[in-house]
Image (tube, rainbow, N blue to C red):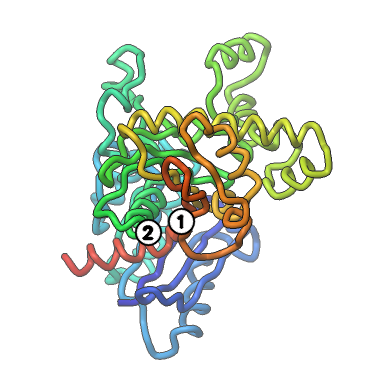
Amino acid sequence: MIILVINSGSSSLKYQVREGDDVLAEGLVERIGEAEVPDHAAALDRVDREVAEALGERTIDAVGHRVVHGGERFSEPVLIDNEITRAIERLNPLAPLHNPAAVTGIRAITEKWPDLPQVAVFDTAFHRTLPERAWRYAVPDELYRKHGIRRYGFHGTSHAYVARGAAELLGTDAFTGVIAHLGNGASVAAVRDGESIDTSMGFTPLEGLVMGTRSGDIDPSILLFLLREGYSEKDLDTLLNRNSGLKGLTGTNDMRSVSESADSGDERAKLAVEVASYRLAKYVGGYHVAVGGAEALVFTAGIGENAADFRAAVVSKLGALGLELDESLNAERSKHARVISTPSSAFPVLVVPTDEEAAIAEATAAVVAGS
């Protein structure tokens, strides 16, 4: 089955065409809304031309969409129809930067290829197994009942994919441990018997770890203080989501640049690495307790897979757990899942590459076949 995987942003559209493990075509259409690409329909016209050139006589069988927020309703991938599209649209207030773009992409494909099956794969779905003690905030119940304020968690498609890969590497039926998905956006998940039982991102993707441009955990009273100081709602949103994290600490959100600057003695960069690695180490320790004893710590995504110095900075703070990296294995560059800890480490430290497009394509094929 040939699957077109779509990741729609407000001004971009990333796509990949897959047949099983084979990537037949991929690309990125940017600057949607400008003169050359006025809307998502025009972006899909470009995708159609590029895909047709790559496939020749063959055609796409189904489309899988990455949808960031599935709320409480969606706990698994679903075949899209008009009602499902409206349901996703009703979740726009919970993910105003992401869900509207996904809905736009879905409708554009529906208009262009009305008979083509489409499947929504939700970033929040993997975390629907969180127990209430983990997803509840200690605020009046009315806020949950009226506004849906609770922890949802994100990066679920990646965490689920990596949990399966880690179990395969360890030779177990289901993974129990801690997964750190570290990219420009970053989250950590506590997984027990293959199910998410806690995660660092919350009501939005802002909570938790220090990220490229996001602050992660912060005292809410700081926001009240800044409001009294004259900051607007828009100012605070820009501050916390676009100008904080590594960027706020160093001026850049690129971990590679931060690490290089730290290695050359830049004090701000060294502090940023310490702040980010310390925050992650605290979560790892807590989630080790949450899962009842981790079988492994797993690093994944762009930073997790490639930033050996940052992995070392994190694990160096986990000596109390008995973790120990093998320096040569940690420094090795590879696209394959691997162990990077010493034999004497209390439990293994792994690098397991993520592939969200592969996970979305696999889920899409399963839903379409089942329907």
Name the residue at the bottom extreme: 57
Q: Which residue is mark 1?
A: 352
- Residue 207 appearing in the image: no
Q: Amino acid at mark 1?
A: Val
Q: Amino acid at mark 2?
A: Leu
Identify the residue at horizontal 30%, vertical 22% (top origin): 144
- Residue 39, disc: none
Identify the residue at horizontal 55%, vertical 69% (top origin): 27
Question: Left or right: 146 with respect to 220?
Answer: left
The image quadrant where one finds the N terminus is bottom left
Q: Which residue is mark 2?
A: 169
C-alpha span from label 1 to label 2:
9 Å
Identify the residue at horizontal 36%, vertical 34% (top origin): 152
Q: Secondary structure at mark 1?
A: loop
- Residue 251 appearing in the image: yes
Q: Along the line of sight, which residue is nearer the eye, 167 or 258?
A: 167
- The image quarter containing residue 356 is bottom left
Decide: few, some or many residues near mark 1? Use Cα within 10 Å; few <14, some 14-19, many ≥20. many
Question: Left or right: 108 with respect to 117?
Answer: right
User: Badges 1 and 2: C-beta atoms under 8 Å apart?
Assistant: yes
The image quadrant where one finds the C terminus is bottom left
Residue 134 in the image, given as x and y percentages of width and height: 32, 26
Residue 156 in the image, given as x and y percentages of width and height: 37, 46
Residue 215 in the image, given as x and y percentages of width and height: 59, 30
Residue 210 in the image, given as x and y percentages of width and height: 58, 33
Q: Along the line of sight, which residue is nearer the eye, 261 or 213?
A: 261
